[in-house]
Image (tube, coloured by chain):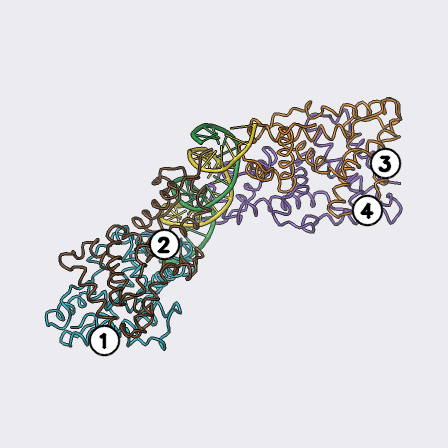
Chain colours: A orange, B purple, C brown, D cyan, E yellow, F green
Amino acid sequence: MRTPDQEKKSRILDSTSSIIMNQGIAAVSLSKIAKEANIASGTIYTYFANKDDLLKQVYLNRKDRVAQAIAQIDDAGDPAQEVSRLMDRMYAFGQTNLDDLLLIREFNQSPLMAQLGIDPSEAYAGFEPLAELTKRGVDAGVFVPDVYPVIMSYAYTPVVEYLLAIRNGGITPEQVPFANIKKLSLRAIVR
Amino acid sequence: MRTPDQEKKSRILDSTSSIIMNQGIAAVSLSKIAKEANIASGTIYTYFANKDDLLKQVYLNRKDRVAQAIAQIDDAGDPAQEVSRLMDRMYAFGQTNLDDLLLIREFNQSPLMAQLGIDPSEAYAGFEPLAELTKRGVDAGVFVPDVYPVIMSYAYTPVVEYLLAIRNGGITPEQVPFANIKKLSLRAIVR
Amino acid sequence: MRTPDQEKKSRILDSTSSIIMNQGIAAVSLSKIAKEANIASGTIYTYFANKDDLLKQVYLNRKDRVAQAIAQIDDAGDPAQEVSRLMDRMYAFGQTNLDDLLLIREFNQSPLMAQLGIDPSEAYAGFEPLAELTKRGVDAGVFVPDVYPVIMSYAYTPVVEYLLAIRNGGITPEQVPFANIKKLSLRAIVR
Amino acid sequence: MRTPDQEKKSRILDSTSSIIMNQGIAAVSLSKIAKEANIASGTIYTYFANKDDLLKQVYLNRKDRVAQAIAQIDDAGDPAQEVSRLMDRMYAFGQTNLDDLLLIREFNQSPLMAQLGIDPSEAYAGFEPLAELTKRGVDAGVFVPDVYPVIMSYAYTPVVEYLLAIRNGGITPEQVPFANIKKLSLRAIVR
DNA sequence: AATGAATGAGCCTTCATTCAT
DNA sequence: GATGAATGAAGGCTCATTCAT
């Protein structure tokens, strides 16, 4: 059970994420966050050292949620099957939490990471099982012989883009079932 | 009187893009732009109606540059070969202009597009040949039977992620030659 | 937390009025107001929505003060006598608060009223007793048969101009006692 | 005949007056004036030393026009009759040039006069015949024994307020003929 | 712990003025 | 003489942060 305080902290994180995703990171202000979280702006400083700390924690919090939701790999499973399951978990997670995936992506590819003092190892934390899966698949000769970032670029990114295209109305799941995406991704990386 | 100066306008666009890429869109301010472009802040208004107009033009300008650099498809060529050439052009372009590709991506997936009043058709303009290539490849039975956004998600995005990983030092071209990326992409989409 | 401060709001209104009267409305700036009121410029926004709101409230506040000071008419009194008393109250009020009368006049005859969204009924509020007095005097055959704006143009305006002429040194109360003004006004409108 | 240059100067004065009257003095800017006068903003400096000089000349120019239109008094005429004629000329002039009367009034009662370096004698220039008429009427025992500013406050101001009330739709000439105004004014000042 | 009033730096924008053309 | 691009100060307003309550 969350203490009342943790609940308030969560509300601040949620409001921040929501503003970032709906209005863009340039539109984020503590007063907006406070209003959306239904607290006084000064209260934010009880839970976060400053605005940068808040942004950093939003990122880390969302990244952890994603990692926990998708990165539970069966170390003994068939690598191709595990990638398929990974993509399934991403798809399931993304249907209710696409914003988390997009927020991570927005941070990952922006100078914000450096500005907020998040180093790559911190960003990577929680996703180690994916790298291990990659390595195992390559070593077993199941995957094409490429490195983690390349392999995952074909397994992870297409799911996000698929979910985003659906949200934007560019395509519908009826028109393009998620199975197609999985098939293409596996065609790319499985020998 | 002093004549309006296309070169100065370019400098403003360049400075703006540079600040976006190096400090993030939230850090863009007209005074920073003016300082980097070596002009007075008020001068920006000789060339742009306001900050939003400037941002919009940065986006459209960069998008046009990319479109011109990569979207020259040979209508009679073999679709698979044309995708290969397309990826080559992206790679060549991205080696000196990766920021353009990243800027477009940052804008595309952000609420900025709506805020700046850029509608999807405007963003799509110039890339029609890619959709046509997709359609031709699918119709000819060369590509897997999927729609444009899906196919291109496997041909376009991996190149950007590859270039970015190289820039970030995550991988090197020696370790993973670009040919590998092309191979994986083609494996995904060519029957 | 610090409590909103009615006294501080008054100080802002006073400073604004003072700058309008001493430097003209074109010279009014929030930083001047803040400096004169001895507060930070941002603090103004705790008490007013924006500059226009501040100007509007200055006007309405001064107008209310004037209305309360002069518009207490005895409904049963002789109309001519009531006009005389009205002018006395204006004169008394104007000796210490001429700026209020002048500020109202400056606003009334300027495009500001429309720009600030003050409609005529709002400007008129509080002065209804004067219109009623006019009507009563005309109906009773005591005043010449003219409408409110005309009658009051002879009772109200001359007092303001008299007070202003005294302030400017154009005339002195010894040279022209206020009684003369009252006499001329009453000669004009009383049959 | 005006030279082309004088014509351009006139256009600048007209534009300035028009903006003052329609948008308020706080909204006057050289670029607006230039646009309305259909010239480049820099050109204004060919005809005026700076913005203050322009405003000063607008005032003096309008004041001269009014003085020439109304201050032609017959030195031998009956004072009461001359006041009546004066009011007629004001009324006639004001029907097509009310803005001139209002602009003068706005300047006269504002700190602008001091800021622009217009001294009272300059403002008074051209209106000497009105003071003489006052004096002659008082000396002849035709007017009540009061000074120029007081007498004229009953002859000049009511005409402006009448014209303004008509423009604003507060009253109509059918409802209140101008003759009424003249009658009230003369009742006030003629013995 | 929570509030929100207060602060002043910094933002976008407009302005009067200058000056190359 | 006329133009309008260029300048940078100043304007209105928002913001992150502090702190009295």
Q: Residue most toward the front? A: C76
Q: Position of residue D109 (x, y in %)?
A: 28, 56
Marks 4 and 3 belong to one chain:
yes
Where does label 3 land, which residue? B187
> Which one is in front, B11 or D153?
D153
Q: Mark 1 lies on which chain?
A: D
Cβ–Cβ below 8 Å for labels 4 and 2?
Answer: no
| Amino acid under disc 4 | Val
Is C109 in front, or is B30?
C109
Question: What crowding class fits label 4: few (fewer than 14 Cα within 10 Å), some (14-19), or many (20 or more)?
Answer: some
Which amino acid type is shown beneath numbered disc 3?
Answer: Arg
Q: Which amino acid does label 2 sit on?
A: Asp
Q: Split into 4 quadrants, where in the image is the C terminus of chain C?
A: bottom left
The chain ID associated with circle 4 is B
- Does D5 appear above or below C4? below
Marked residue chain, label 2: C
Determine which residue is flagged by label 2.
C64
User: Quadrant of the rendered structure where residue D47 is?
Assistant: bottom left
Residue B34, can we see it? no
Viewer-side label of 4, 2: 2
- Coordinates of residue D137 in the picture (x, y in percent): 14, 71
Q: What is the crowding at mark 3: few (fewer than 14 residues within 10 Å), some, or many (at least 20)? A: many
- At 80% across and 22% down in the image, what residue appears? A132
Q: Tell me the distance, in whole angstroms, between the alpha carbons under discs 4 and 2.
A: 69 Å
Specify the amino acid type for callout 1: Arg
* Residue A22 - label: none
Quadrant assignment, res B184 = top right
Q: Give the number of the mark in front: 2 or 1.
A: 2
**Of the numbered discs in the image, which one, if any, rests on residue D85?**
1
